[in-house]
Image (cartoon, rainbow, N blue to C red):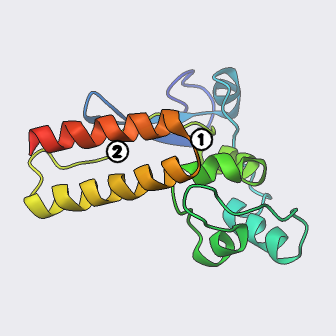
Amino acid sequence: MLCEQCGQNEAVLHLTHIENNQMKSLHLCEACAAAKGLDTPHDDAPLPLTDFLARVNRGESTVAGPCAFCGMKLDEFKKLGRLGCPQCYVTFEPHLSGLLRRLHGGTQHVGKVYLPPDPTQAQQEQRLAGLRRKLDHAVQAEDFERAAQLRDQIRNLERAG
């Protein structure tokens, strides 16, 4: 497949993103991806997540403290392969930045959290319960800015429901 930007070179980076509720794909060659500031995959590079978990297993990564928001530890992430909350990205940033850059081409989330257009009462209650737990964690961690944001989200959902 040829690069959609220059139309000359073979595409090595394939991105899919949502824009105005429409899924769009972009296929770029190494030069065009680099011009946009995106890292390109290398055929000889190991799988990023597997490599990261292997390094953690070998003790090459320094041990990080638990996430102040949800309490997850780095070794729990190693076992589960996923983080406990959005605050984990901040807590484990030194360990995750390279991994996220290789997996996603960047380290900043730019999307939205999905909530169905017409959520059921159970889905709304589940979302509210999750937000209330996060609010409790934010207050315990004395992250009052985050707590205020969560409080506002809870109020908005309660008004809509």
Q: Residue at x 68, y 51 (%)?
A: 91
Quarter assignment of residue 66: bottom right
The residue drawn where x is 66% and y is 32% is 38
Residue 39, position as x, y percentages in the image: 70, 37
Viewer can see residue 120: yes
Q: Is residue 113 above or below residue 126?
A: above
Q: Residues within 10 Å of mark 1 (few under 14, many from 20)?
A: some
Q: Which residue is mark 2?
A: 113
- Dot 2 falls on a residue whose secondary structure is loop
Q: Is residue 149 left or right of residue 78?
A: left
Residue position marked by numbered label 1 in the rendering: 13
Q: Position of residue 20 (x, y in %)?
A: 27, 27
Q: Is residue 1 visible?
A: no
Q: Which kind of residue does numbered mark 1 sit on?
A: Leu
Q: Residue at x 34, y 52 (%)?
A: 131
In this picture, residue 3 sits left or right of residue 97? left
Q: Nearer the viewer, residue 125 or 89?
A: 125
Q: Which of 91 and 24 lies nearest the eye of the viewer?
A: 91
Q: Secondary structure at mark 1?
A: strand
* Vertical comparison of 4 with 65: above or below: above
Residue at 39 percent of width and 58 percent of height: 133
Q: Mark 2, residues whose alpha carbon is within 10 Å: few (<14), some, or many (≥20)?
A: few
Kind of residue sitting beneath label 2: Val
How many angstroms separate mark 1 from mark 2 (CA)?
25 Å
